[in-house]
Amino acid sequence: MHLSRIKIENFRNFADLDVRLGGNLVVVGENRVGKSNLLHALRLIFDPSLPDSARQLGLSDFWDGLAELTKEDRILVSVEIKEFEDDPDILATLTDFRLNDDPETVRLTYELRPIADLDGEPGAAEDYEFICYGGESETKTFGHKLRRRITMDVLPALRDAESDLSVWQRSPLRPLIEEAFKGVDAEELEEIGEAIEEATAKVTQFDEVAALEKSIADLFQEMSGEKQDIHPKLGFSPTDPARLYRAVRLLIDEGERGISDASLGSANLVFLTLKSLELRRLIEENHRDHTFLAIEEPEAHLHPHLQRSVYRHVFTEAQEGGAPLSIILTTHSPHIASVAPLRSVVLLKDEGDDGTKGYATQSISLESKEADDIARYLDVTRAEILFARGVLLVEGDAERFLVPAFAEALGKSLDELGITVCSVAGTNFRPYAKFLVGLGIPFAVITDWDPREGKSPLGWNRSLRLVAAIETQRTGEKPEALIEELKELDEDDFAERCEEFGVFSNLTTLETDLFAEGFAPAIFSVLNEYKLSAARKEKIKAWEDDPTKLDPEELLKMIDGIGKGRFAQRMLSYVDGIDPPDYITRAIEFVADRV
């Protein structure tokens, strides 16, 4: 089973959140957009450790955009669940909560609303009550019985793993140790207790240790009196066989050191390991039918490579291991997001008066090949576009190096604006454009016109398909009238119209356009840095003397020989004071105006 939809109304950051899901859930977004509040909303439905007193929300939990609360205002959290029918235990738990018009979908709802017999408008927390119900009828209520079988466990952000591991009642090691010791013979434990008692006696034979023990005992008795005396003694562990297992501790470095000597990252990883083992045990022993394991900011104190390794394993186990387990993460880490299943990502964005909105990759219309391309791109680039406020999509390394410098020349710092330049290593922009439209991230495409003799330019066909893909993803319908309109335009009007949709093209190719727009001296300076043949040096000299003699194809061959990326890097040393090409200027301003 998996969550297929989350809908939240009037709760904290969320005026009206509605996202479709495909399984695991990885929530990304800037600070204060409501990632933790999204988890808390799910806890209202699934977390058995949350008492009903905590489910009784207050006035401060309503969305801030509600100026004055009325009887019509309520907090609503609902989830929909699919693929639950294969497990008979889950089916038995959820079958009464199917939707009337879609029996393959279950809906569970939490609702906070004014009490039924309230006189006047609500003005205090006492004026509200909550109800948890399934399906489409409030008479089908649910409570702890469901949460005990379909459960949410939350590992909070910045947890003190070392402290939790050292305190028996909070330690995730405790249930594992208790289960392990169930099968140990009591007589064998007694023998171990006697051995510990003998070892303790040997230690306390040292005068200094015995004196310390006596000092502690005497002072405690003086302070407490005889009736409250607990008779404290020094020892390695309790010797009572029934309590002996509580003294077992997890050690590191092959038993040479305790967990308190571990790094913060290692302690967090140990905590996650133990929690995962506990969940496995609960599942294997049929104590649960399904578990939602929610981890807030799991990147805390972990090296980037370890983040990728650990959570790639976590996602793989959840997806392929067959265990009834769903992973829910909130993260600021591009390293974790880059290994997350593509369809699991939800981007939260603060949209001002409309509250926080969610954009789910599950809702983006991608063909399987396109989805594979995006997944590989996110993996290799560490998911940089998921954390950008805006994106400039470019063809290759040359633009990737030059565009940030052009932006600086315009007085726009892409870093400060949160704009990322992403190279697609070619001209297949459509999957990336659809992906960004689906996530609500402003973007522009910077591409070459690539004219062809006797044929329509490659850039014309590319731009037409791009606009069609962008509008189809945005509206859900193929823009047939728009396509026909674009086909009737001449090249100049066509290019100008495409810019309204974020597609910006030059006249030919990047390098030849740069040559024509004032960058010829910079290009010559870079070419002259390299050992070229005498024939090529002669051609360069002729172009310097008379730029109208430029052979574009020969120029591109020379640049290809150097490498376009390397050529662009060297160009940066010579472009100060030169205005960027107009089409790149317009593309940068298009995105900057929208972030």
Image (cartoon, helix red, strand yellow):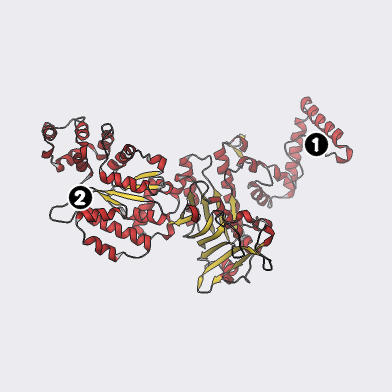
Closer to the chain start, of discs 2 and 1, is: 1
* Image quarter of residue 131: bottom right
* Image quarter of residue 406: top left
Q: Is residue 320 visible?
A: no
Nearest the eye: 95 or 28: 28
Q: Check residue 232 in the rendering and tell me which mark sits there, or answer none.
A: 1
What percent of the width, then of the height, locates residue 47? Answer: 62, 57
Q: Is residue 227 visible?
A: yes
Number of marks drawn: 2
Nearest the eye: 70 or 323: 70
- In-image side of 585 versus 30 (left or right): left
Q: Check residue 450 in the rendering and tell me which mark sits there, or answer none.
A: 2
Mark 2: amino acid: Asp
Q: Compared to 511, does 372 lie above or below?
A: below
Q: Compared to 100, does 212 lie above or below?
A: above
What percent of the width, then of the height, locates residue 90? Answer: 57, 66
Q: Residue furthest right?
A: 226
- In-image side of 61 versus 560 (left or right): right
**Helix, strand or loop for disc 2:** loop
Q: CA distance from mark 2 to mark 1?
A: 86 Å
| Residue depth check, mark 2 versus mark 1: number of the one nearer the observer | 2
In contact (CB < 8 Å): disc 2 and disc 1: no
Mark 1 is surrounded, within 10 Å at the Cα level, by few (under 14), some (14 to 19) or many (20 or more) other residues, namely few
Q: Residue at x 85, y 37 (%)?
A: 224
- In-image side of 371 versus 169 (left or right): left
Q: Residue at x 55, y 71 (%)?
A: 98
What percent of the width, then of the height, locates residue 173? Answer: 64, 46
- In-image side of 376 versus 26 (left or right): left
Nearest the eye: 81 or 421: 421
Q: Check residue 366 in the rendering and tell me which mark sits there, or answer none.
A: none
Q: Residue at x 15, y 43 (%)?
A: 553
What percent of the width, then of the height, locates residue 32? Answer: 53, 47
